[in-house]
Image: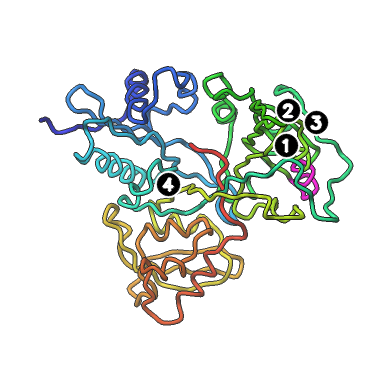
Amino acid sequence: MSEPTIRLATDADFNDVLHMIRAAFLEEIADKDDEWYRTEWEPDRLHLVHDGDELIGTAAVLTLDMTFPGAGPRPFAAVTTVAVKPGHRRRGVMTKLMHAQLHGLHEQSREPVAALWASEGGIYSRFGYGLASHYLRAHTPKGAAFRPGVDVGKDRVRVVSRDEAMPFVTELYDRVAPQRTGWLSRNERGWTHYLWDTPTFRDGASQLIFAIHPDGYVIFRTKRKWGDRGPISDLNVLELAASTPVGTAAIWRFLLDFDLVAEVEAPIPQDDPLVHLLKDPYQVVRKQKDSLWVRIVDVDRALVQRRYSAPLDTVFEVTDELCPWNQGRWRLVVDSAGAATVERTDADADLLVDTADLGSVFLGGVQLSTLAAVGRVRELRPGTLIPAARAFLGDQQPYCPEVF
């Protein structure tokens, strides 16, 4: 059996990549549109592994920005299309891909932070990724009452055509996203990919419906259903964004009063205000789902990309088997404005962490103290854990509205 080889893709590899990843993710050839894949096709950032002439593994990076805590949009490596062909697994193919990808980012001084959505939870911690964020799938019955005093304003939420909605939607998203930790940059190509709306994407539901308010928008689908007592249709939200509390309340009221619908299902952040709008918060059934896994590519370049919640002066002893340049002691100093400096040091360490732990806490949604409670982080000098945990906290729970 030959030793697998690795190289970067070219445009000529598109069809082979498409067929391989469809097989790896158990998709039928007709399940997706080829042009949908092309909207995120960056061959010069896609590693391929071959066994002879057979393509057996892929791992790609999309060039995007993400809003980091307190710092607005910052470049990050959006890792996607990580797949190994059935029949070639357990041979080190993924390790080869992860090694090439991370070492390439470091050697070329590209994005200092990588992030991905994982299809299986047991894979990426082996490569230094830490689970950094979650989201909720909220199920709320039609007509759920607001608590007294909720201000929905006087402006109406209007259903409009996609063409009418898009200039408003993109402008509002560009204003809101830089303040929302975990939200991604979207150019025209990104919007096309995100809002792809061919029949294969609808799963029997309607085409995307756009509704706008002066302070926000919602994009959703409906799926007709009828029960013995009448209509019980589904309303599934793709994205809701608002720039004011009134806009948020008005859009939720619009959704919860939608005719013929029995229940509204929506992905929401862990700290979404919906439950606080309702008279009976128990009406919202929330199911927590895992979201972003984050990998620190370069400790010194990564930790200065975000802002921190409190001043700090601490020394981390960092372990990192896959990226040895991160190993050793690093001094993190945060000033009163939340800006950080990071440099190597010979001083005694305060905390022992792995890069996966730094990835988990990077977006501010997971606490160092939580990881310490399960033995993943060790306090080497008493009294240093809690100040560090406080500094890494964000002002909001990280939330990524889209899978990449």
Q: Amino acid at mark 1?
A: Tyr
Q: Position of residue 306 (x, y in %)?
A: 53, 57
- At x 23%, y 36%, the residue is 89
Quarter of the N terminus within the rendering:
top left
In the current view of this chain or complex, which residue is farthest to the front? 228
Q: Which residues are magenta?
A: 243-252
Which residue matches tag 2?
Answer: 165
Say what secondary structure mark 1 lies in. Answer: strand
Q: Residue at x 34, y 49 (%)?
A: 122
Q: Which label sits in the foreground, 4 or 1?
A: 1
Q: CA distance from mark 2 to mark 3?
A: 10 Å
Mark 2 vs mark 4: give the one in front: 2
Q: Is residue 45 left or right of residue 188?
A: left
The answer for how far apart the CA atoms under marks 1 and 3 are is 9 Å
Q: Position of residue 270 (x, y in %)?
A: 59, 53
Circle nearer the N terminus (1, 3): 3
Residue 28 position (above or below residue 173)? above
